[in-house]
Structures are given as C-alpha cells and as structure tokens.
Amino acid sequence: MAHGRLPGAEPAAATAEDRLLWEQVRAALRSESGARNFETWLAPLAFLRCEGADVHLAAPSAFLADWVNTHFAERLRQLWAQRRPGSRHVIVTVQAGGAPVVGIAANSADIVPDTEMALSLPIESRYSFENFVVGKSNELAYNAALAVAATGTPGFNPLFLHSTTGLGKTHLMHAIGNALQARMPHAHIIYMSAEKFMIEFLAALRAKDSIAFKQRLRSADLLMVDDVQFIAGKESTQEEFFHTMNEIISSGKRLVLSADRSPQNLEGIQERILSRMAWGLVADINPADYELRLNILHAKVAALPNAVAVPDDVIEFLARRITANVRELEGALNRVAAYASLVNQPVTLEFARATLADLLRAHERKLSIDDIQRKVAEHYRLKLSDLLCARRAREVARPRQVAMYLAKKLTPRSLPEIGRRFGGRDHTTVMHAVKRIEELRALDRELDADVVLLTRQLDG
C-alpha cells in the first residue's frame, strides 16, 4: 500500500464522499494543532476506507501509528463522528514500506536524540503580536505579553495567563517567543507543556541525568510552561517545578505560565507554587464578545489562501453563532473555506449553514416554530392568527409560506410537525411552501431580502 502526505492512493472501497470527509477532518486537525505539528505527526496519515462504524487510516511507521493512537485517537473519532454519524472507532494501522517519522509534537511524551530540541517544543512562527486581534476581553493579557517580549526588564515576573481553551493563551506565548527572539537573536528560549516538563524530568531521574536537565532548563532567558494545571497531584514534579521557578525569577530571567484557571482556583498544587504564580501579573482572557469575534473573522478572511471570498453576511453569521472560543470560530471559517474550494462553490449563507450543520446544532439555542411565527407576523404586520388560519389571500399566504420555509430551514422539526403547527396543515403543504419560496427567492429580490433579514434576526 502506498501512502503520502495527501491522500490519493486509497483503496477502491474509499468513496468520493468519504475522501471529502477526510479532507474536512484534515483541515480541522491542521487548524487545531498548527501547521508544524500537523505536518510532522498528522499529515503522513493516509485514509483507507470506512467500514460500518470503523474508519481505517494508515501510518507509514509503527512509531507514528502508536503516537497517533495514543494522542489523537479520541479527537479523530470525534471529528469523524461529527461528519459521519455512526463512526465510533478510528483504527490506525501501519503501511508496509513506510519510513519512520521523527519530530516533536506539542504535549507529546516522545524524546528525540537532540537534547535541546527534546527539551523545548517549537515556537510556531505563524503566531505573532501582529496577527493577534485585540479586544476588551484580552487587552490586559496582550499588553502584558508585549511587556515580557520587550528588551527591557518587565515590571513583573512571572506572567500568568489563564482562560478556558481556545481563547489565545498559546498564541500569546508563541508571540512572546517570536518577538523576543527577533529582538535578542541569541536568547535561549524554552517553550514546553507542563506535561512535557513532568515527562522530561522523570526521564532525567531514570537516566540519572537530573543535574543536566536542571542546567538546561534554568539556563533559559525565557521559560514558558503551558497548561500548568497538569502538574496537580504530582509531588516530585512540583518540587522540581518550584525550584525551577525560583531560579528563573531570582536570576532575572523571564517566566511565562498558563493554565485553564487562575492560581487561586488551581487544585492539587502546593501553596508555595500558587503563591509564586500569583507573585507577578495574573492576566485572564475572557470569551470574545461579538465585536471581537467579528474583527477576528475579518482578519482571518484576509489571510485565507487562494483568495476565497467570504461575504459579510456569512462572517456576521459565524460571529453570532460560534461563541464558545476563538479556536472553534477559526476552525469553522477554515472548514467553510476549505469545503468551498474542494467542491468549487461560492461561499454563501446557505452554503455555510449546510457545511457547519453539525457544529451549529451543538450551538443551537433551540429556536422554536413559535419564535419564527411571531417574527414573521411582526415583519409582515399580521396577526399571529393570520398565519394559522385557512385564508388564502396573497397578503397572508405568502408570509405563511415564508414562515413554513424558515421553520424547515432553521429547526430540526419534521414536515408533518410543521404542518400541524400551522393550523393542522398536511406535510405536502409544507413541502410546496418550501419549494415555492426557494423558487421565488431566485426571481423576487424583495422576497429574498425578506428571507435574509428574517434569517439574520432569528439566528441572532
């Protein structure tokens, strides 16, 4: 079996639809993991086939297959299940004739021969202060990160960043590393996860090389440790972590830490470590508001490859509907753009809605048929009872069809249920209404504008 960085040699059992789903999964993985980690660990995977509830992938080496099964099996399963309901297992096997892949992955336990490379994870060049979009929710963290990256001595140490996942902590840490390296080319910068700190420390103990480990770590001009909540309950690791923090701070070196919550809310970590963490500047990053989400999307659209055109109404739609975190927001945009390129279709509001159907269901605010009926009646200045009665006059019948159309497009309700909610009408009446409005939208600009406006108002 052949393999490659782009699937193209899948067995005949792999359908065109399955291959398209694999491209969507790959795009999501690239967005989540970063280009460098993706190319090292995930791009070599080849798609083989889907069999029932199983998705079969192939890796070019046992080493890579084992790493993916250990670190990414669950995320792969989730991504497939979102796009192919019923997918329950992702099976990664080894292809014959594949060459081993060597590299470093974020939050990985793997150690490569070069000790300095093994100690520090790569600083992603794509993360910079210039492409970090600033708003009220992240302004303090951004300005604090700028101060750490400046050539002078910061007025605080350490910098402790905290937020829920996907709001920009890691972006700022990489931006600090890139900016400081540009200003101080010979600076020794180490970026690692707390999990990697623990694994490297325990490995050094087993190899009776803990002194060398400490020397390499404490020689850093800038030490950044991501996700420090993962050392909770690890007493020997915490002991070494505390002494490392002390050494870095007392020697005037820079220390940046991040976690998913503030120091006072971290559990299972020694009080003296928490005190040290809070000794400098603690900066939280709050969820992005609508305005910031909109600005982020405009910035990301401008940077999209192949000049993919994303209309303003789609950007506004995504900013309203994808509110959990920035990473998910960017992932949704990348998914829409990638899918549009693959199927050679323009990006429209309906296209975005169809492409992100599974994601939108997760964010659904349970829009009801009653909500739609009230909004349509208000828009056309009718009584709610007019939409439910048997009158067939055009001034009532057309708004009723619009309401049925929106109920079908914006809710998961079945045609018979929609018909019942419109005065006990048959499901074929709803089918006719949906078809008729779809036809008229292409011919009647005023009606199309009404539908677009109502959709925005109901989505919001």
Image (cartoon, rainbow, N blue to C red):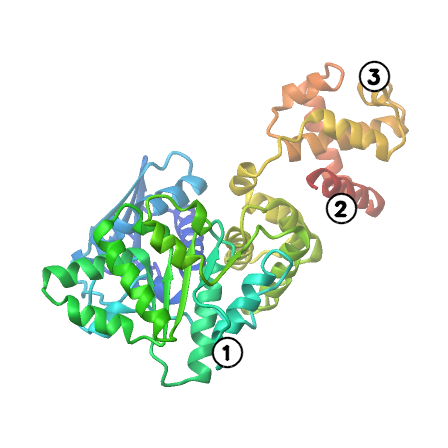
Foreground of the two, 444 or 320: 320
Q: Is residue 125 visible to us here? A: no
User: Where is the C terminus found, in terms of image quarters?
Assistant: top right
* Label 2 residue SS: loop
Q: Give the amino acid type for the residue marked by disc 3 in the picture.
A: Cys
Residue drawn at (85%, 35%) of the image: 379
Label 2: how many residues lie within 10 Å, few (<14), some (14-19) or many (20+)?
A: few
**Callouts 3 and 2 close, C-beta under 8 Å:** no
Foreground of the two, 189 or 132: 189
Residue drawn at (83%, 29%) of the image: 377
Residue drawn at (87%, 26%) of the image: 396
* Label 1 residue SS: loop
Q: Which label number is shown at residue 150?
A: 1
Q: Is residue 45 positioned above or below 424 on the image? A: below
Q: Give the amino acid type for the residue marked by disc 2 in the picture.
A: Ala
Who comes first in sequence, dot 1 or dot 3?
A: 1
User: Where is the N terminus found, in terms of image quarters?
Assistant: bottom left
Tag 3 residue:
389
Of badges 3 and 2, the one in the foreground is 3
Q: What x and y, as percent, mark residue 358? A: 51, 40
Tag 2 residue:
442
Label 3: how many residues lie within 10 Å, few (<14), some (14-19) or many (20+)?
A: some
Q: What x and y, as percent, mark residue 55? A: 31, 43
Of all residues, the one furthest to the top in this rendering is 424
> Which picture quadrant has residue 247?
bottom left
Q: Is residue 301 positioned above or below 114 on the image? A: above
> Which picture quadrant has residue 210?
bottom left
In-image side of 314 versus 82 (left or right)? right
Q: Give the amino acid type for the residue marked by disc 1 in the picture.
A: Ala
* Label 3 residue SS: loop
